[in-house]
Amino acid sequence: MASQHKTSAVPTAPSPEQRAQQRQILREGDRRHHIHPFTDHQALAQSGAFIAERASGSTLYGEGDLALLDAMAGLACVNVGYGRPELAQAASAAMRDLAYYHSFQAVTNPHAAALSARIAELAPGSLNRVFFANSGSEANETILKCVRAYWRLKGAPERQHIIARDYAYHGSTMLTTSLNGLPVMHQAFGLPMPGISHIEAPYWYRLGGDLDPEAYGRKAAAALKAKIMELGRDQVAAFIAEPIQVTSGVIMPPSSYWPEISAICKEEGILLIADEVVTGFGRTGHWFAQNHYGFEADFMTLAKGLTSGYMPLAAAVVADPIADLVLDQAAPFSMGSPHRAIPWPVRWPMKIW
C-alpha cells in the first residue's frame, strides 16, 4: 500500500494586482485614521501617503518595488543600515527572556545595566550617569528637569532661564518645542513658553558676511555672553545646543565656535547641554561630536543612532558633579518613563554597510 503523506499548501505570493489592491486598502485606512507628523493633511487627503515597504542596507523599497537610496538614513538615525539580522536576533532573544520590566525603585536588568556602563565608557569626560527614555524629546525634557533640580539644590532656584539658538531642534514636547528655534513650530500652539531665549546660530554661510569662518565663530559665540549679561547670570540655568544643527540644513559651526562657547559657560557658571541625538554614534567620525569639536558638556542627550532606529530608545547622560548633587539625596529621584527592558546588544563598534 502506498504511503500517504500529508501536505500543506504553500502560500503563493500575491499577484501584482492583489498587491496594488492591498496598498490601496492601506492607503485609504492611513488617509482616514493616521495623523502624520510634520505633514500637510489637506494635501495628504488628496494624494495619499507613499508606502515604504521594506529596506536593506542603505536602500529603501517602496510600493511597486521602487528602490531608493535612503541618503537621510530615515530621520538621520539608521546609522548601521537596514535589515541587520544580528540586531533582530539579539532583540528577539532578549525579548523572549524579558520583554518588558521597569527600572523604578532599584530594579534593573542585564541589558540596561550593560548598556549604561558602555555609554559611560564611550562618553566624553565625566559624563558617566545614564538615564534611559524613549525619545530624544524625552531625554531633553529629562535634562531640563535635572537642571532645575541642580540649581534648587545649589540654593539658586531662580536660575531657570534656558538659552537655545535660532534654527535649533530639540524635540516636540511643550518645553522642547519651545527650545526649537523654528517659529513655524511655535505659532499653532502659542509657544514658546516663558523662560526661554534664542541667540544667533553659528551659520557662517548665511550670516558670516565678510568675516572668515574663525572670526565669525567667535562672533557667534559672543552672542551667548551678551544674552547672559542681558538676562543676568543669576537668572540663567543652562545653554542647550546641537553640536551640528542638522534639522535646519546641517549648519556646521566654525572650529572656533565650540571652544569659545565652552569657555563662556565655564566663566559665567552656566550649565552646558549638548544635544547629540543626531550627532552621536559616529556621525562626525568620532563617537560623539564633542570629541570632534574638543569640548565637554555637563549633559548629553542621545537617541537615533543609539539603536540605529531599530527600536525606540534614548539616553540622558549626566556628568558626575551634577549627578552627585542631584542624586545624593536621602529621597527618591522622582522622575521616570515607562521604557522597556532595553533588549539591545552593546557590541559596538559594528560594521557599517
Image (cartoon, rainbow, N blue to C red):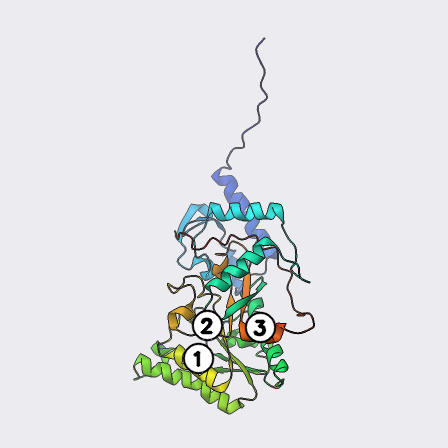
Q: Is residue 109 above or below residue 283?
A: above
Of tags 2 and 3, which is closer to the observer?
3
Tag 2: amino acid = Glu
Tag 3: amino acid = Ala
Q: Which residue corresponds to the image point at 60% horizontal and 76% vertical from the top-left? A: 325
Which of the labelled discs sits on residue 323, or is there none?
Answer: 3
Of tags 1 and 2, which is closer to the observer?
1
Residue 172 at x, y percent in the picture: 56, 69
Decide which of tag 1 and tag 2 comes sooner along the chain. 2
**Number of numbered markers:** 3
Mark 3 nearby-residue class (10 Å; few <14, some 14–19, many ≥20):
some
Q: Is residue 88 above or below residue 216?
A: above
SS at mark 3? helix
Contact, mark 1 vs mark 3 (Cβ under 8 Å): no
Look at mark 2 in the image and give the residue it sits on. 242
Answer whether residue 249 is visible to the viewer in this image: no
SS at mark 1? helix
Q: Nearer the viewer, residue 147 or 40?
A: 147
User: Which of the 4 quarters of the picture holds residue 196?
Assistant: bottom right
Contact, mark 1 vs mark 2 (Cβ under 8 Å): no
Q: Is residue 107 above or below residue 178?
A: above
Q: Which residue corresponds to the image point at 58% horizontal and 57% vertical from the top-left? A: 112
Check the picture and name the quadrant holding the N terminus: top right
Q: Which residue corresponds to the image point at 50% horizontal and 54% vertical from the top-left? A: 346
Question: In the figure, is residue 199 to the left or right of 236?
Answer: left
Cα separation, mark 1 vs mark 2, equals: 13 Å
Cα separation, mark 1 vs mark 3, equals: 20 Å
